[in-house]
Structures are given as structure tokens and as C-alpha cells.
Image (cartoon, rainbow, N blue to C red):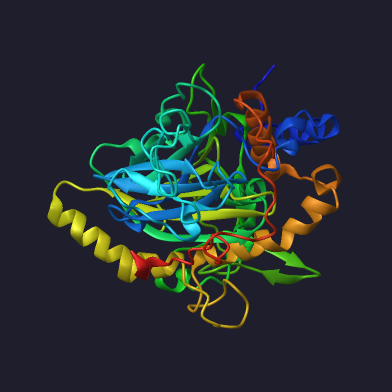
């Protein structure tokens, strides 16, 4: 029997991909993922950018529902549970440090060595018998390429942080420039799926970026065949899913009215966008060739609580020397960064449209609009998926298979937005802040 033509074979593959989505959706073989409101336990998470914590200073963050006090000592960052074991006061609501290695509770003077959590002094009872006996909870912390990562879990020792990072984040000579770090309404899973869902490119069609970077932009892209979706699923991490070749949708219409995207002429065909995009556990994205040729963008959607995530964005590029690195950082601050993210300063209009907003501002806004129905109206089970969601359901299945654990509330209660500094753990950082 003759082989089908390439066009027919491709259509058959597309039908196979669509059928896979329907079959998976009928079975929902990723209930563990659906239950992971607070994130995955026993994984490393991006917490903040290194320059946000100078030597000797203290800052608080909430990650996966756990409140953590971070202090930098002689260049190294340490993490301590942000509630004193005596009466539960938050260290970071009024940090006191009387030596390089310690953090003192402002209420009764309980003083801990941040390096190992040991109680070394009580200023209101010097020489207390508790000294040397009481130890407070600490967190493993690593800093790589200017991003601080913290391990949330019980494994001792924890797995190497490299097993929970996007592979290209570890490239040699990589220079990483922070772009934004902001807390947003929206569960971390919606954020991660949104970052990887190329079909939502339609919603970016009016982004100001495409006036500055005048490339034709499709309304949508999605994996052409199963073979174009690579599961990174070895015995040890990193675990993730990467897509390469895409079907590009350039033209569509409603009742005969054409709908096109940026820099696209009606009825003209264009070459496919083949941009490598990977989503890696627990919640990290890597995008090649964005926001400009030769540049990569890394994102993390770190769970804060069930209703919020910390959206962390940086751009990166290999550089051969300090001069190249300096030029790249300046380009990020003045050119690339504003294309990606702009602070909300009352711009008005449709979020994400035009030059007043960055490309990824729209993504954050979009997740906020989806959050309610998923979190409170069971859209994890009610959603109606389509062919481009193949990569989304594959991601859900991979996470359900490979998660080292599921984060639970335990004895960390929901805070309803409270944080020790009164700012709700929202740094509100844009390109100009780095």
C-alpha cells in the first residue's frame, strides 16, 4: 500500500493529537495535580532575586503557604521559619540583628543562629537553660545566577537544586538580568499553564511589542504532532515538557469578517514560528528567542498560597566578557525589559494592549480572570479542552507522576493576605528596579 502524502499524514497526526486530548479528558488521569493547590512538596522554588537582599539584611517571603525569613550572611543566604518558637511573633515584622550570624525576635529577645537554627541567647533571660537545646526550623537555600532558591519539604538531604531548574538556566557564561517580580491573584498551576499555552498568543495580538519588533505573529500555535512534544522524564530531574515545531494559525474569520494578528497581511502565508519552549517542574518556564533573537526568557510561578503566585521574570544571554555582560544588562533595563513588563501606574485601557503595557502584563491579568472559576467553581473538572491543550494535559500528567510530594497546609494557616511587613508579600518590582 502506498504511503499517504505528507499533507494527509500530518492531518492524521493532528487527529491523533486531538483524540489523545479527548481520551485523557475522559479519564482525568492527573487528580494529584488537581489537588496540588499549594504546590509540590520536596521541591526547590525561586524565591527572589539576589540583589533584593543585601548582606546583613533580612526579608520575608511566603512560599507554598510557609512564611520564611531570609538573611544574607557573608554573601550566603539562609532561611528560617518566620515565627518565633516562643510566642510565634514574626521576625520580619521588626528584624533585629545584634551579630552577623543571628536573628533576634523583637518581642522577648530569643536569638537564633540563622545558619543552623540553634538558640544562642535570650536577651530577657541570659543563660537560660533553653540555650543550646532549642532549635528552630531552617530551610535549605541556594543562589544560582542571581536567583535565590529555597527548598520546601522534608527530604534530608534535599535533592540537588539542579534537578528542579530549567536546563538552559545552567548554561555556561549565562548572564541573567532580573526583569520583574510581582505577586498576583491566580493559582500557580494556572500561571504555569498560561506560560506554556501557545494558543493564547491570540490574546497578545495587540501587544505594543510587535510594533517595536515587527515580525509577523500568528493568532495561535500548537504542537503539530505528538513527536514534536518531548517529555524530559528521566529517573532524576529536571522533569519537564518541551515543544518545538508548531502548527501556526495565521488567518481566521467570524461570519466572513477576517481576524488577523500583528504584522500579518490578509491571505498571505508565512513561515512557521518554531520557538523552543519548555516547562519544568516544579514551576519554571524557559523560552528561546524571546523577547529578541539570541535572548532567552526564564519565568517562575512560585506558589504563595492557594490563591496567589509570585511571578518572577528574567532575561538571559551567554556573554563572553564583562563588557558584553554590561551591555546586555543595560539593554534589558532600557529596551527589552519595558517590552516584557511595565509597572501598573494607572495606564488604563486594556491591560496588555499598546505601548503602555508590557507583553507579560497581559498574562498576569489573564490568570486573575481565570482564577475564580478554577478555584471555586471546579473548572478543573468542568473545562472543555481542545487540540492545542495537548501540551497542557501532558504537563499535568507528568507532574502527577513525578511530584516528590504534595504541599499541605499542616500547621501553617492561611493568612488572608496578612504579612509581617503589611505589604502582603508583594514586591511590585519592574525592570527599572534592578
Q: Nearer the viewer, residue 233 or 244?
A: 233
Q: Nearer the viewer, residue 391 or 180?
A: 180
Q: Looking at the figure, which quarter contains the N terminus?
A: top right
User: Which residue shows up at 58% across the image and 47% down it?
Assistant: 196
Q: Residue 428 at x, y = what percent? A: 49, 67
Answer left or right for 365 relative to 140.
right
Q: Residue 148 at x, y = what percent? A: 39, 45
- Above or below — where is 305 with respect to 411? below
Q: Nearer the viewer, residue 319 or 83?
A: 83
User: Which residue shows up at 59% across the image and 25% down it?
Assistant: 404
Q: Nearer the viewer, residue 202 or 192?
A: 192
User: Which residue shows up at 68% across the image and 28% down it?
Assistant: 400
Judge whether residue 415 can be spotted in this image. yes
- Above or below — where is 257 with respect to 321? below
| Numbered circles on residues, count | 0
Answer left or right for 164 relative to 88.
left
Judge whether residue 295 can be spotted in this image. no
User: Which residue shows up at 16% across the image and 46% down it?
Assistant: 320
Q: Residue 294 at x, y = what percent? A: 32, 51
Amino acid at each position: 500500500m502506498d504511503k499517504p502524502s505528507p499533507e494527509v499524514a500530518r492531518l492524521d497526526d493532528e487527529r491523533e493529537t486531538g483524540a489523545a486530548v479527548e481520551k485523557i479528558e475522559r479519564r482525568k488521569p492527573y487528580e494529584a495535580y488537581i489537588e496540588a493547590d499549594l504546590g509540590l512538596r520536596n521541591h526547590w522554588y525561586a524565591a527572589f532575586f539576589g540583589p533584593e537582599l543585601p548582606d546583613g539584611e533580612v526579608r520575608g517571603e511566603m512560599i507554598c503557604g510557609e512564611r520564611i525569613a531570609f538573611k544574607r550572611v557573608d554573601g550566603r543566604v539562609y532561611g528560617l521559619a518566620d515565627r518565633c518558637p516562643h510566642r510565634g511573633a514574626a521576625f520580619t515584622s521588626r528584624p533585629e540583628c545584634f551579630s552577623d550570624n543571628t536573628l533576634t525576635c523583637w518581642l522577648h529577645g530569643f536569638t537564633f543562629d540563622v545558619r543552623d537554627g540553634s538558640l544562642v541567647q535570650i536577651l530577657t533571660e541570659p543563660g537560660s537553660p533553653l540555650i543550646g537545646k532549642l532549635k528552630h526550623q531552617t530551610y535549605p537555600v541556594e543562589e544560582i545566577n542571581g536567583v535565590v532558591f529555597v527548598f520546601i519539604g522534608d527530604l534530608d538531604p534535599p535533592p540537588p537544586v539542579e534537578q528542579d531548574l530549567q536546563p538552559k538556566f545552567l548554561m555556561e557564561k549565562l548572564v541573567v538580568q532580573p526583569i520583574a517580580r510581582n505577586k498576583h491573584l491566580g493559582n500557580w498551576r494556572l500561571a504555569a499553564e498560561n506560560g506554556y499555552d501557545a494558543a493564547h498568543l491570540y490574546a497578545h495580538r495587540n501587544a505594543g511589542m510587535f510594533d517595536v519588533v515587527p515580525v509577523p505573529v500568528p493568532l495561535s500555535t500548537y504542537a503539530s504532532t505528538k513527536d514534536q512534544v518531548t517529555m524530559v522524564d528521566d529517573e532524576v530531574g529536571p522533569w519537564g515538557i518541551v515543544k518545538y515545531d508548531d502548527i501556526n494559525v495565521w488567518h481566521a474569520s467570524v461570519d466572513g469578517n477576517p481576524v488577523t494578528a500583528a504584522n500579518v497581511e490578509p491571505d498571505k502565508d508565512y513561515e512557521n514560528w518554531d520557538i523552543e519552549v519548555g516547562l519544568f517542574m516544579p514551576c519554571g518556564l524557559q523560552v528561546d528567542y524571546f523577547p529578541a533573537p539570541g535572548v532567552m526568557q526564564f519565568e517562575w510561578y512560585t506558589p504563595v498560597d492557594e490563591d496567589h503566585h509570585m511571578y518572577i521574570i528574567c532575561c538571559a544571554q551567554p556573554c563572553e566578557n564583562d563588557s558584553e555582560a554590561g551591555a546586555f544588562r543595560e539593554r534589558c533595563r532600557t529596551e527589552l525589559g519595558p517590552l516584557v513588563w511595565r509597572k501598573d501606574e494607572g495606564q488604563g485601557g486594556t491591560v496588555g494592549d499598546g505601548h503602555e503595557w508590557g507583553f507579560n502584563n497581559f498574562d498576569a491579568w489573564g490568570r486573575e480572570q481565570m482564577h475564580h472559576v478554577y478555584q471555586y467553581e471546579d473548572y478543573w473538572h468542568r473545562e472543555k479542552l481542545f487540540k492545542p491543550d495537548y501540551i497542557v494535559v501532558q504537563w499535568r500528567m507528568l507532574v502527577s507522576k513525578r511530584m516528590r510530594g504534595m504541599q499541605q497546609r499542616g500547621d501553617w494557616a492561611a493568612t488572608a493576605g496578612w504579612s509581617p511587613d503589611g505589604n502582603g508579600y508583594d514586591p511590585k518590582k519592574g525592570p527599572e528596579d534592578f
